[in-house]
Image (cartoon, rainbow, N blue to C red):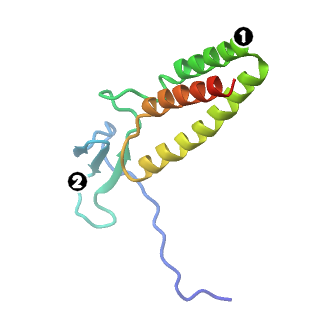
Amino acid sequence: MPDDNKKEVLEAEYVGDSAHEPARSYSYGQYTYREYGNGGDGPHGRTRFTVFRFRDNNRLDACRGMQLANFITMVLFFTCLFQWGFLAALGFAFFYAIAAGAGLYYNTHKLLTGHVPNPWPWRIGSWIVCLALVSWLV
């Protein structure tokens, strides 16, 4: 079945000096807008693109603290294991898995709405609630 609504596809090509320095660069918080080239605004003139930076020097990077979060979780797991036994440690792991899934959903929702999430309050709250649940059940 032939398609009558075919659209012409153009491949992007950089034409310019070898320094590859942007002609203009604008930064709006997490977004950076750059224009390359010195031609007009047509398809063969300037090349425009937007860069989203996942790393911001003013905030705590979530990936940088991941080793610390895993270490604290394991310390709490082993604390439950040695203080209350295997079933308590298993209960802590189960409750924390549910809390981590809910935190992942919440942080992903915040990220998709345009906010940069901070995972630490959720993690700390999850540790406190899970320990409180396990100690109450024991």
Residues packed near mark 2 inside 10 Å, few (<14), some (14 to 19) or many (20 plus): few
Q: Could you tell me which secondary element the residue under label 1 belongs to?
A: helix
Instruction: Of the two numbered discs 1 and 2 on the same chain, state the one appearing first in sequence.
Output: 2
Which residue is more in the foreground, 15 or 21?
21
Callout 1, which amino acid?
Answer: Phe
Marker disc for residue 38: 2
Residue depicted at x 64% and y 18%: 74
Figure quadrant of the N terminus: bottom right
Which residue is more in the foreground, 65 or 56?
65
Question: Does residue 138 lie above or below 28 as drawn?
Answer: above
Question: Does residue 70 lie above or below 27 as drawn?
Answer: above
Residue depicted at x 45% and y 66%: 10
Q: Position of residue 111 (x, y in %)?
A: 43, 47
Q: Are marks 1 and 2 in contact (CB under 8 Å)?
A: no
Q: Describe residue 91's horizontal placement relative to residue 22 as left or right.
A: right
Cα–Cα gap, marks 1 and 2? 68 Å
Residues packed near mark 1 inside 10 Å, few (<14), some (14 to 19) or many (20 plus): few
Figure quadrant of the C terminus: top right
Location of mark 1 (residue): 82
Callout 2, which amino acid?
Answer: Asn
Question: Does residue 52 lie above or below 60 as drawn?
Answer: below
Question: Does residue 81 lie above or below 113 as drawn?
Answer: above
Marker disc for residue 34: none
